[in-house]
Image (cartoon, coloured by chain):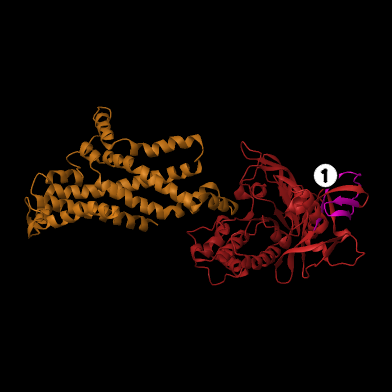
Amino acid sequence: MSIVLEQLGYCYPDTTQGVHALSLEVAPGELLAVIGASGCGKSTMLRLVAGLLPVQAGRVLIDGQDVGAVPAWHRKVGMVFQSYALFPHLDVLGNVAYGLRMQGMDRVNRERAAQRMIQAVGLGGLEGRRPSQLSGGQQQRVALARALAFRPSVLLLDEPLAALDAHLRSQLCDEVRDVQRASGAATLFVTHDQQEALMLGDRVAVLHEGYLQQVDTPRALYARPANLTVARFVGHANLLKATVIDSGRVATALGVLAAETGRRSKGAAVHLMVRPEACRPDPDRCAANRIEGVPGRVRFLGATCRWDFVASAAAEALAASPGATPRSTTTLLCEGPVVATSAVSLAPEELVVLDDHNAGSWRSPPPQS
Amino acid sequence: MTIALYLAYLLLPIALLAVGAFGESWTNSLLPSGFTLRWFGDLIADGSFRRAFWTSLLVAAGTCAAAAVLATPLAYVLYHRGQQGSAIAGRLLASLPVAVPALTLGFGYVLVFSSDQMPWLGTLPLLIAAHVVLTLPYLTQTLVADLRHLGLADLEACAATLGASPSRQFWTVALPCLRHSLLSGLVMVAALSIGEFQISNLIASFKFRTYPVVLLQAFYGATGYACAATVVLLVLALAAAKLSAQATGAAR
């Protein structure tokens, strides 16, 4: 019940699109969320695991067995498609029982098993409906039930919630998690929505242009992105151009700030990542990394606010040489229930220094068991 | 305005034919005078019309059956190999009969099938084959459009992950999904076959003349008689459409 990808490679004809040297492990019962912009290769990866595309390089192992030569219909891989791909000519029961029917199970048994699965996803009573008579959320549940009804060893979810409205999506997120847990299948969950990935994944993998950027727990990914690409993609972040001027000190458009610089040499060009919630409003006079300025636009979000903070020192510098500094380096995106009036401080332990070029090679930690 | 004109051009002749079929006499006036059913009586009494009526039905049914058997796999291949070279041959095959005038095909058949090697001119199978050639492109296009609309590629990929081999994907997903468009496509095939005149007139033998071929004779007689015969053709075409619908419905 595990998935292992070893140096997996696939390239679409006459392009560089696809996946390159992709190595990943999904432990039994684990849900690994894969995020990336559209065209980053995440769906390609799923299709390679499912056997819908031929592996060009590397290996795909399911339960330790190389499945490169096994056709899709013998892999026992449950997959939920973004379009759901429900069979329009079958009712809910027929759809969910389809996998068992292909296995040659007799009608009575397969309908009983399908019935159980339909109950598990909360669609009891709708067995006789056609897909066209169901709402989007119900269709999604049918697709999930169908993918799990024949007890696949692995589950592949291709943007399963993308077509739903926001409210339903967060509700179904929990349901998908529960059903997946109960099935015990090693699961790859592909999404372009990083919030979904952080919420659902035991671990999260970030793909960019076919290359794996980082695999880590949601918390670690958020707090310590391995590079700029990951920092840009996961969560909101202020990314400030900076230069290392000393060990533990970097120069930015907002002034000199204290931050952990690691073993980077003096003068190294880096970026400083500041999460919106790392901006503390109106700190003590002596607080570290204190920046004076004025609040800008405030966006009220209920429990919290997301507000802009315009640093005055940087704004003055900008006024002196118009067009020299883009707005993003003078304005910090901040988040918290209280909006600063005259100053913010950036907690040094929450600042992350990132290399401009993804020089540092990143190594995958072993999967949780 | 355009639509009104179009409808007038389409419906007026049909309406006049219907009126004419029941008119006693109709010469050099806008509308016929008197009311009679005798034209229909004459028609029924006419043996050549009766035979042509059943021949047309038989040809339409045979054309529908053969077209369905040929067009379904053809559409399937065209959909799946849409980008590849082998599709060009298929596309050519499917669109050529539309481009080539039916008259040209008819003359060709006369030449080929009156030879000693293939003396089949005038046989029923040849007539049906000719109708299949004419109607296949329309049916194939209908099916391909429906396959695209359904997103069959996703459905089949999904069936594959659920354990269906390619042949089972075809029988349990593609074919059942296609039934609606197959049905509407066959209605079109039946209507086209019933109304086909050009080729039928050239290659049908005296024994297997289709209704439109015999109908031409009626125009040399009384106007009311010709109108009645045409009305029967119209009803026949509609009935064939209905019949093919029921036949495909029952086959499922």
State the image coordinates of residue A265 (x, y, percent, origin top left). Answer: 91, 44
Above or below residue A15? Residue A190 is below
Colour of the chain lettered A = red
Count the marks: 1
Q: Secondary structure at mark 1?
A: loop
Side of B237 where A353 appears, left or right = right
Q: Which residue is mark 1?
A: A361
- Callout 1 environment at 10 Å: few (<14), some (14 to 19), or many (20+)? few
Which residue is at 23% across, 39% downward? B198
Chain part drawn in magenta: A249-274
Q: Chain of mark 1?
A: A
Q: Please state which of residues A342 and A249 is positioned toward the viewer in this rendering.
A: A342
Colour of the chain lettered B = orange
Q: Please state which of residues A230 and A175 is positioned toward the viewer in this rendering.
A: A230
Residue type beneath disc 1: Ser
User: Is residue B47 found inside the magenta-colored segment of the image?
Assistant: no
Quadrant in which residue A84 is drawn: bottom right
State the image coordinates of residue B97 (x, y, percent, origin top left). Answer: 34, 38
